Amino acid sequence: MNSLITDYLAEVLDEVRDDTAGEVPTYIPALQKADPNWLGVALCTVSGNVYSTGDSSPEFTIQSVSKPFAYALALQEFGIDKVREHVGMEPSGEAFNELSLEEEDKRPLNAMINVGAITINQLLNGTDSTVEDRVEYIRKYFSELAGRDLRIDEDAVEGELEGADRNLSIAHMLRSYGIIHDEAHDAVLSYTQQCSILVTIEDLAVMSATLANGGVNPKTGKKILDADVCRHTMAVMASCGMYDAAGRWLAKVGIPAKSGVSGGLIGALPGQLGIASLSPRLDEVGNSVRGVTVFEHLSDDMGMHLMNTENRAGSHAVRSITREGDCTTVHIQGIVNFVAAEAIVQVLNQHDFTTGRVLLDVSRIVESHPIARRMLKEGLRRLREDGHEIGVIDPEGELRSRVLDDGSRLPLVE
Ligand code: GLN
């Protein structure tokens, strides 16, 4: 029954599939290994359920999507105040590889652009760490966030370093202001290795869900980051994660996010879920063209905008399950958004219904989102397919329409 979510995700991918706008960047040779047509999306809920569709198996280099995670690690190690002495948190409104520093105190503006990310990378594992130890430390931590052992694409590192003049100039500039201390080459080597960790969209969805879940990896249950570190990281992602499209993104999509040149795009919705998409062709500011559209659809359809006033919700969506004779009733309650509907559908999916009849009592719903109503109806329809007689207790007409996807009507029970 889980497939109703992946079916929905597949519909979203179908809507954007034919868009061939944008270009795969050429300045990192390894990016040419990507098939420009790759298209995939994955979700991981804070309860640890992962859904993916499309190209979920290709591994690609994480690139700039590594920045928020490296930033979170620095915050965890040194505390927010100390890290702020090195890197600010203001949107730059500039390209990701701009050689820019704050006017007054010469700090990088934020950790989501290269100048800030190189500075953050240099803090990790202590400023006197060797490049090798630092990179291994980061690789291990990324692996914990993903819940599996990740590796580095050394060819990608080599290729990027051959044309890394821009990042080298950034590192020289940082060194000249005493912001970093390693040789420029070492700093860029270490940062480029961080960018060359190989991931899939499922890895990225779990990593993002770990941020959304206050630092506990929902798949492994391991506590990796403090909740205030996650909150701070997502706040900076919200204002700076999409380069100079960050303002438009926050207004339109409203999900803290980060994009990368390999076509990956992540979103973390606090307390709800992590999302990741892959589509390698980029727009002029460096964001994945179809990735952006996928997120626009998800945000709209699933009511995921951070500023949604109905965003409180999720847990305790199933109030009780009662049984009388040959009838089981699942009573649901509260604000039923995507995450709540997912939890309810999981119950409909996993509960061992031994009665012929299964009813869904929606009379205690306070508010429901269209995608959630659709999911509930589809969950019931699939129970009917499994041989149960189904019905709904809905005195207020909360479901709006009782027409199911196959055109049949859901019986109303008094
Ligand atoms: N390694 C890449 C660079 O520094 C990452 C950039 C990106 O993903 N936007 O140029």
Image (tube, rainbow, N blue to C red):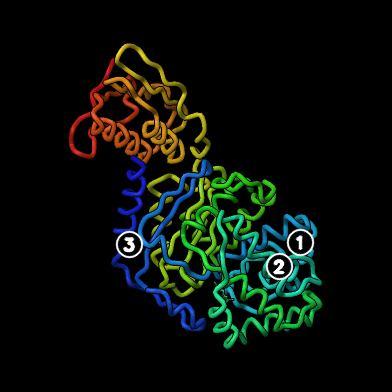
Assign a secondary structure to mark 2.
helix
> Mark on residue 83?
1
Q: Quadrant of residue 404?
A: top left
Q: Marks 3 and 2, how far apart in space? A: 35 Å
Question: Which residue does the numbered mark 2 point to in the structure image?
Answer: 120
Q: Quadrant of residue 110?
A: bottom right
In which quadrant is the C terminus drawn?
A: top left
Mark 3 or mark 1: whose residue is earlier in sequence: 3
Query: Outermost residue, top direction?
Result: 325
Q: Amino acid at mark 1?
A: Val
Assign a secondary structure to mark 1.
helix
Mark 3 or mark 2: whose residue is earlier in sequence: 3
Q: Confirm or reject: label 3 Cβ below 8 Å from ligand 1.
A: no
Mark 1 or mark 2: whose residue is earlier in sequence: 1
Count of picture labels: 3
Do the residues bearing badges 3 and 1 touch, measured as CB atoms within 8 Å?
no
Indicate whether 412 appears above or below 224.
above
Left or right: 104 with respect to 397? right
Q: Is residue 322 visible?
A: yes
Where residue 303 appears, x then y in whole percent? 43, 44
Question: Which residue does the numbered mark 3 point to in the structure image?
Answer: 16
Query: Which image quadrant shows ligand 1?
Result: bottom right
Assign a secondary structure to mark 3.
helix
Q: Amino acid at mark 2?
A: Ile
Q: Amino acid at mark 3?
A: Val
Q: Marks 3 and 1, how far apart in space? A: 39 Å
In which quadrant is the N terminus drawn?
A: top left
Do the residues bearing badges 1 and 2 touch, measured as CB atoms within 8 Å?
yes
